Amino acid sequence: MKIALGLYRHMLTPENFRFARQCGCTHIVAHLVDYFQGGQLHGTDETTTWGVTQNQGRLWTESELRELTRAAGAEGLEVAAIENFDPSHWSDVLLDGPNKRQQLEGLKTLIRRLGKVGIPVMGYNFSLASVWGHVVGPWARGGAMSVAFRGPAGPRETPIPNGQVWNMIYDPEAPPGVLPPTDHEQLWARVEEFLETLVPVAEEAGVRLAAHPDDPPLPTLRGTPRLVYQPHMYQRLLDLVPSPANALEFCLGTLAEMSAGDVYEATRHYASQHGIAYVHCRNVRGKVPNYEEVFIDEGDLDVLRVLRILAECGYDGPIVPDHTPSLTCDAPWHAGMAYALGYLQAAVRSVTAAG
Ligand SMILES: [Mn+2]
């Protein structure tokens, strides 16, 4: 297994690449969407979004992707994956809007560019509401700040306004009103078209598409359907277009939050069919509708047991800490990640040595 660090766009700097290498990472997972902009990840009320995306019609260029791989390479790292499409690149793919065909062509171009520069995975989250509704508080060990989902006691589930999807504003000029209703089968039809269009291109480009499950894993959120909110729903997604290029961004925390199923069985099930492109590893206490993100060595998930199963199934791909609670010090995010990465280093070494 390859230890990797996920970095948001504003964190893709030589200093952070060096930090990752110093923590023993051989790979990074890069977010190129301009969310957060260095600001808040989680909002204070139901109207908060991750901001306005400024990339309508502007696909990530081959030279910017190549520069990313060069800059990471200069610090001894490979780019294992790009995580998440920009909402403005695929809003009408998610919403079945008038620009869908054109946007699918754009996504094909992006996948081909990833292939050209040697980035082997494109992670995505086929979701209208995306990650939403979490609150911040001192829920991890020692009162470390982390995020929780509180169901009806959390932010009120307001409908999604026009011009927004995936928790970002892609059209600030959109007319007033909210998204039209969508049901689960309509959403499945949309992801099927997305996969049928992109999987052949990804195969040819040597890129794997990797699906993240819905976080929080509820049947609906803000009145919109969720796609993968129980472990078995990942299989439906793989079966839509069977191919090595149709794979999973296997989020252990989200799987552990699901109300049904078993995260260890799911890990064996998907790893043994080589369906996992990369792993998000974080720990959690509780399940929907009430759970908290905690340190990698507390919470409900037995991380060592999961890693042992991955090793037994021959999984040799990247594993990233996903998110961690913040440590109380001058560098809360970095310290939290360094802690999780140190744990992962030792844990991966112990399970692979035992095998
Ligand atoms: Mn995740």
Image (cartoon, grey):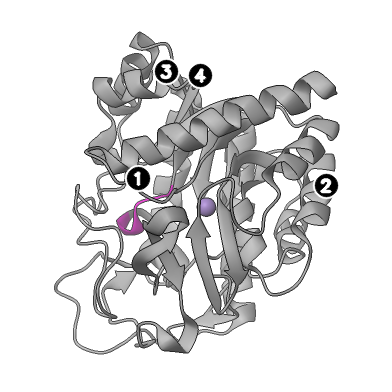
* Nearer to the camera, 342 or 111: 342
| Mark positioned earlier in the residue sequence (4 or 3) | 3
| Amino acid type indicated by mark 2 | Arg
Whichever of callouts 1 and 3 sits on the residue coming sooner in the sequence is 3
The stretch in magenta equals: 84-88
Circle 2 or circle 3, nearest the eye: 3
Q: Indicate the amino acid at tag 1.
A: Leu
Q: Residue at x 40, y 17 (%)?
A: 22
Q: Secondary structure at mark 2?
A: helix
Name the secondary structure under disc 4.
Answer: loop
Residue 321, horizontal then vertical, whole percent: 51, 41
Which is closer to the viewer, label 1 or label 3?
1
Whichever of labels 2 and 1 marks the residue nearer the N terminus, that label is 2
Q: Give the CA separation, mark 4 to mark 3.
A: 6 Å
- Residue 135 placement, left or right of 38: right
Question: Separation of disc 2 and disc 1 at Cα?
Answer: 32 Å
Numbered label attached to residue 268: 2
- Other-residue count near label 1 (Cα within 10 Å), few / some / many at <14 / 14–19 / ≥20: many
Residue that numbered label 3 is attached to: 21
Does 102 lie within the magenta span? no
- State left or right for residue 202 relative to residue 58: right
Q: Say whether disc 4 or disc 2 marks the residue closer to the N-terminus.
A: 4
Where is residue 39 drawn, in percent x and y? 19, 53
Is mark 2 in CB contact (under 8 Å) with mark 1?
Answer: no
Q: Which residue is mark 4?
A: 26
The residue that mark 1 highlights is 327
Structural crowding at the residue carrying mark 4, measured as other residues with C-alpha within 10 Å and reported as few (<14), some (14–19) or many (≥20): many
Taking depth in this image into account, of 138 and 316 the one nearest to the observer is 138
How far apart marks 4 and 2 lie (CA) works out to 25 Å
Badge 2 or badge 3: first in the primary sequence: 3
